[in-house]
Amino acid sequence: MKKDIHPKNYRPVVFEDLNNGFRFLTRSTAKSDETIKWVDGKEYPLVKVHITSQSHPFFTGEERIVDIEGRVDKFKARAEAAAKAREARMKAAQKAAARKAAKAEKAEAKNAAK
């Protein structure tokens, strides 16, 4: 195994779940500018996370959408915009095909008149 590949600066850090406010103290190398006073009276760095075992559907048994940053809304908006763009492209293609067909008919009628 390779030597000296793991960090040496482990320290106690508090992680906070933004979904339900659950906090736990563990050792980590995660950097943070925020601190929090823990139940033992000491201050520890605070790292905020979007999901932990206390809010993840696999561990809670609940099936729900966790939408911290509007991801679902953004996805729906992109899907709607894509559908509109697809529809606009189809209409443009139909117009072009109709124009081409009309031009071909006109040329055919001109050739038939000769």
Image (cartoon, rainbow, N blue to C red):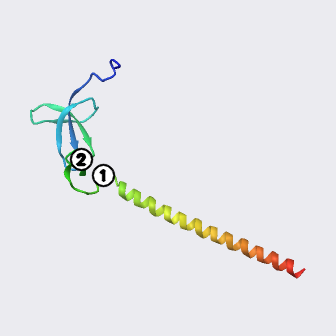
Residue name at image x 77 percent, y 73 percent = 104
Question: Which image quarter: residue 111?
Answer: bottom right
Question: Which image quarter: residue 13?
Answer: top left
Query: What crowding class fits label 2: few (fewer than 14 Cα within 10 Å), some (14-19), or many (20 or more)?
Result: some
> Which labelled disc corresponds to residue 68?
1
Residue 109 location (% of width, % of height): 82, 80
Do the numbered discs 2 and 1 sit on residues whose CB atoms are within 8 Å? yes
What amino acid is found at the position of numbered circle 1 in the picture?
Answer: Ile
Q: How many discs appear?
A: 2
Q: Is residue 96 above or below residue 70?
A: below
Question: Which image quarter: residue 96?
Answer: bottom right
Query: What crowding class fits label 1: few (fewer than 14 Cα within 10 Å), some (14-19), or many (20 or more)?
Result: few
Residue name at image x 22 percent, y 56 percent = 62
What amino acid is found at the position of numbered circle 2 in the picture?
Answer: Leu
Of all residues, the one furthest to the top in this rendering is 3
What's the distance in space between the residues labelled 2 and 1, CA to CA?
A: 8 Å
Determine whether, in the image, residue 24 is placed left or right of residue 89: left
Name the residue carrying label 2. Answer: 18
Of all residues, the one furthest to the bottom in this rendering is 113
Looking at the rendering, in which quadrant would you find the C terminus?
bottom right
Looking at the rendering, in which quadrant would you find the N terminus?
top left
Q: Is residue 32 above or below residue 67?
A: above
